[in-house]
Amino acid sequence: MLILVTDIQPSNIFVKFRDRSRIESGYLAQVPIPHQDRTEKGYTPVPSTPLRAHYMKKVENLTEFDIALGDWGVASWVHNHLTENIQPVALRAPEVLLKAPWDKNVDWWNFGAILLELYRAIRMFDGQAPPDGHYDVKVHLAQIADLFGPFPRALLEQGDEGLMQEVFDDEGGIKDEYAWHRVPLDHENWTPGLDKEDREDFVSFLRFVMKIDPAERPEGVDMLRHVWIQALPPFTPKEE
């Protein structure tokens, strides 16, 4: 049975160390492991600290890293949801925000939304409403519509009826009160530092995976064939 992560966010993406000797010769050489007595009830933990100073500065190619997803505490089966309250709020898929049925495609929206955050440490959506910046799902939906809208009628018909009437007009757009106007996703303000071709490929991939209608999102194998993925440096898994 297929398992969904439903919680892809930066804090749940881990770098796996291939060469553990770098920890031993670097970090642990400076912070020795405390003596532990298994008979004692208490214990002395090894102090927590970022390890990039002992690892990343020695890595010339980022494809040398192994990456793993962690914190599967809210992972769910496709047809047996443990909870409907999934995903970090700012990264929630449209169908989750609308309280419509969701399936495996929620992870693909989540994946697309996080790419920009990883690149620039900014969020594509925040749902912050004026004047005090409190979160408002209507603003969040307006921000989505501004970049990817309008919302398809078939999806709106599956959402919460009260929310649909409050937020959307007859064409699936956001009512004027919550209009949100930002520069288009392919504007250089979103992706400074990328040349025109790289920006177009990157934005094309975001639009490819972040379809408002979950039924239109691609399968994983289709993503691997996208020009932006094909242009990335090849990854060679470590031999065990």
Image: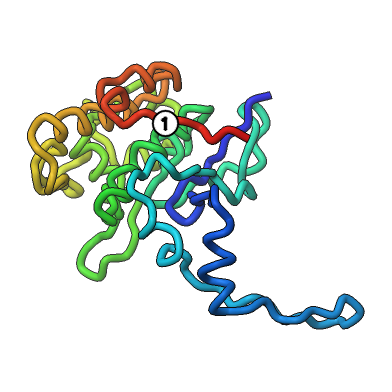
Q: Is residue 18 above or below residue 171?
A: below
Q: Residue at x 27, y 59 (%)?
A: 128
Q: Is residue 68 above or below residue 220?
A: below
**Res 224 → quadrant:** top left
In the rendered image, the residue lying farthest to the right is: 39
Q: Residue at x 9, y 38 (%)?
A: 195
Q: Determine if residue 26 is in view.
A: yes
Q: Residue at x 22, y 39 (%)?
A: 174
Q: Is residue 22 above or below residue 30?
A: above
Q: Is residue 182 above or below residue 230?
A: below
Q: Position of residue 139 (x, y in %)?
A: 27, 50
Q: Residues within 10 Å of mark 1 (few under 14, many from 20)?
A: few
Q: Position of residue 44 (x, y in %)?
A: 72, 81
Q: Is residue 191 left or right of residue 1?
A: left
Q: Position of residue 109 (x, y in %)?
A: 39, 34
For badge 1, the amino acid type reads Phe
Nearest the viewer among 43 and 103 is 43
Task: Identify residue for label 1.
Answer: 235
**Res 115 → quadrant:** top left
Name the quarter where the C terminus is drawn: top right
Name the quarter where the N terminus is drawn: top right
Q: Is residue 14 left or right of residue 133?
A: right
Q: Determine if residue 212 is in view.
A: no
Q: Position of residue 168 (x, y in %)?
A: 27, 36
Q: Residue at x 42, y 36 (%)?
A: 161
